[in-house]
């Protein structure tokens, strides 16, 4: 597992890149955050940690609505049932929301907690999660004075800073227990979870990967019901109860078996057919099974089967691990954008050359993503790499160096600074990781390295201060107008596709070039199709999240029934409006 990159250093570098990417996102909208397995560093890919996101995984992007009218006020529960006073933002003057079982009672028009952006050829799938900010966290038993835990000092320090600090980032998402959909918001502990995941040792991270693999790939192939979050919840209970001396490689399988036994015991302790286990951080809350799940007795039997047959159930996992050392962390989707920007800035690079080169680069990137890792050169990859290097001018050195390094890595070659002809370990969209520095790199240090690399990538125009990205004019000009309109729509303002189209064309240099050369392109509207594709989803979700905007939503539905040219099925109307 270490050879495949399942080490704390690899995880820290991936998390550092994610936090730098979050800085870039927050230049577009301050309410955006990157959460989930990609930002955690563990679990975005179950077969290696190299910065990639598996096809059956995604990147969670959470939009936290911070407007005062959207904030939820909850009080901390105490043992005797009394209410504790609020500490900040004048909350003592506001009637708190009713809290129970990890949820707050609220009138919620949106029933789904997220908007799913499907995986594209060059981008991983993205889940956009809409959330309401909360004034504080509910009661956290783990942080009670006198509570005895085996969690490390670093983990406990990070948890206390998040929960008890001056600016807790607690939020609630639209998710409810069975039968209460639309009337509850679930309090999210994702920032507490991230505090834990960023401080795991290599063995603890490997434990999580094995448990997640068993739940996602093995047990779920036999029965339906367990969510992958169960694996993370089990990790927290094991960290709480297992002394540090027991977290060693020789004990790994025994710890996995112990965690499955705990899962069985928790499922059997509840009489409810829908309840799986108790939430680790919110002990009064329950973690439920999936909707339309198999009987709990069948799920329990499947978990026991895995616990009794660990070696055979984990055989597909061990056989799928790469046979070469995973010594780099890639950032493929950003580096592809870097290449496009660099080519646009080449004064002698024509539109036709740009299209041709990006088509070849796209084909190479798709080959890198889709083909299984190999230990020897692939003729197809080699030829594509030669074609790309021949077409890309030397002035686009960052994108060119990244694509070369990614292709070499895919073919099983050890990527070194010498191979790249660059003295720095931070190389064009990747970070070369030494095998000897396990547990030596924190996420904060890794983020500083990622930010420094982005600043040195001059074509992006990134500026930073104190290890944080503070400006990136090219990114803001390119996507800022569109994101601003979408953000307004999330706050209840009506936005049309025409407005988004015009905002895209006005801010995007790439769009301007393509629009000016429309005779060489099939359709003007197709240029910006990727940006418009999900606008209907934004319109529906944002209208329903605003309790006073029901009439607007009805008007929009009425407009569509009347043949609104905004309807994506009206291809000709879209094309005409794009030209206007």
Image: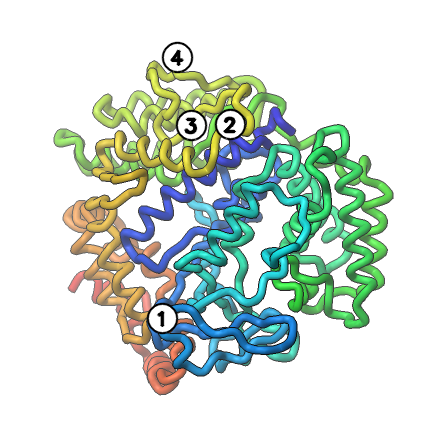
Between label 3 and label 2, give the one nearer the viewer. 2
Distance from Cα at disc 1 to Cα at disc 2: 39 Å
Asked if the residue at tag 4 contacts the one at tag 1, i.e. Cβ–Cβ closer than 8 Å, the answer is no
Which numbered tag is attached to residue 89? 1
Distance from Cα at disc 3 to Cα at disc 2: 15 Å
Asked if the residue at tag 2 contacts the one at tag 3, i.e. Cβ–Cβ closer than 8 Å, the answer is no
**Placement of the N terminus among the 4 image quadrants:** top right
Question: Residue at the spot x=36%, y=35% of the render?
Answer: 448
Asked if the residue at tag 4 contacts the one at tag 2, i.e. Cβ–Cβ closer than 8 Å, the answer is no
1 or 4: tag closer to the N-terminus: 1
Question: Residue at the spot x=27%, y=24% of the render?
Answer: 397
List the residue tagged with mark 4: 418
Indicate left or right for 514 with 163 as reference.
left
Residue 227 vertical placement versus 40 (above, below): below
List the residue tagged with mark 3: 431
Element carrying mark 2? loop
Residue 492: quadrant of the picture: bottom left
Residue 577 in the image: state x and y as whole percent: 21, 66
Distance from Cα at disc 1 to Cα at disc 4: 55 Å
Between label 2 and label 4, give the one nearer the viewer. 2
Residue 15 vertical placement versus 112 (above, below): above
Question: Residue at the spot x=67%, y=48% of the render?
Answer: 149
Which numbered tag is attached to residue 440? 2
4 or 3: tag closer to the N-terminus: 4
């Amino acid at each position: 597992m270490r050879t495949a990159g399942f080490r704390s250093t690899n995880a820290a570098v991936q998390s550092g890149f994610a936090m730098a990417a979050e800085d870039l996102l927050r230049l577009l909208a301050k309410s955006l955050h990157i959460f989930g397995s990609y930002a955690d560093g563990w679990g975005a890919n179950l077969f290696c940690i190299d910065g990639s996101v598996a096809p059956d995984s995604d990147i969670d992007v959470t939009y936290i609505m911070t407007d005062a009218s959207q904030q939820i006020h909850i009080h901390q529960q105490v043992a005797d049932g009394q209410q504790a006073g609020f500490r900040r933002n004048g909350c003592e003057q506001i009637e708190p929301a009713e809290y129970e079982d990890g949820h707050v009672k609220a009138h919620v028009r949106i029933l789904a907690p997220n908007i799913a952006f499907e995986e594209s050829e060059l981008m991983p799938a993205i889940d956009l999660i809409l959330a309401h900010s909360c004034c504080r966290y509910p009661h956290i038993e783990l942080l009670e004075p006198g509570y005895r835990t085996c969690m490390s000092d670093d983990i406990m320090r990070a948890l206390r800073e998040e929960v008890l600090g001056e600016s807790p980032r607690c939020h609630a998402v639209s998710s409810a227990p069975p039968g209460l959909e639309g009337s509850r918001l679930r309090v999210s502990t994702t920032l507490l979870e991230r505090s834990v995941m960023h401080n795991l040792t290599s063995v603890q991270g490997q434990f999580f990967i094995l448990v997640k693999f068993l739940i996602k790939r093995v047990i779920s192939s036999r029965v339906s019901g367990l969510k992958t979050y169960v694996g993370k919840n089990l990790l927290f209970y094991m960290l709480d109860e297992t002394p540090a001396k027991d977290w060693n490689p020789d004990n790994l399988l025994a710890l996995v078996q112990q965690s499955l036994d705990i899962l069985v015991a928790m499922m059997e302790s509840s009489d409810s057919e829908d309840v799986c286990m108790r939430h680790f951080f919110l002990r009064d809350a329950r973690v439920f099974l999936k909707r339309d799940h198999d009987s709990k007795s069948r799920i329990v039997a499947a978990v026991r089967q895995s616990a009794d047959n660990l070696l055979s159930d984990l055989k597909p996992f061990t056989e799928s691990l790469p046979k070469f050392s995973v010594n780099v962390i890639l950032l493929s989707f950003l580096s592809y954008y870097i290449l496009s920007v660099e080519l646009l800035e080449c004064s002698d690079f024509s539109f036709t050359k740009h299209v041709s080169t990006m088509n070849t680069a796209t084909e190479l990137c798709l080959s890198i993503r889709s083909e299984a890792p190999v230990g020897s050169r692939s003729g197809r990859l080699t030829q594509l790499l030669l074609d790309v290097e021949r077409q890309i001018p030397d002035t686009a050195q960052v994108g060119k160096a990244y694509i070369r390094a990614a292709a070499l890595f895919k073919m099983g070659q050890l990527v070194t600074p010498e191979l790249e002809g660059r003295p720095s370990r931070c190389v064009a969209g990747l970070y070369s990781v030494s095998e000897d520095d396990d547990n030596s790199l924190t996420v904060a240090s890794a983020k500083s390295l990622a930010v420094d690399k982005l600043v040195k990538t001059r074509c992006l125009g990134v500026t930073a201060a104190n290890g944080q990205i503070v400006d990136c004019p090219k990114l803001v000009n390119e996507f800022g107008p569109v994101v601003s309109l979408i953000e307004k729509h999330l706050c209840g303002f009506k936005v049309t596709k025409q407005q988004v189209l015009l905002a895209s064309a006005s801010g995007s240099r790439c769009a301007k070039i393509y629009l000016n050369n429309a005779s060489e392109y099939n359709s003007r509207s197709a240029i910006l199709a990727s940006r418009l594709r999900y606008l209907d989803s934004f319109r529906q979700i944002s209208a329903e999240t605003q309790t006073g905007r029901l009439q607007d939503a009805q008007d929009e539905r009425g407009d569509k029934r009347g043949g609104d040219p905004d309807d994506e099925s009206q291809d000709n109307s879209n094309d005409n409006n794009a030209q206007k």
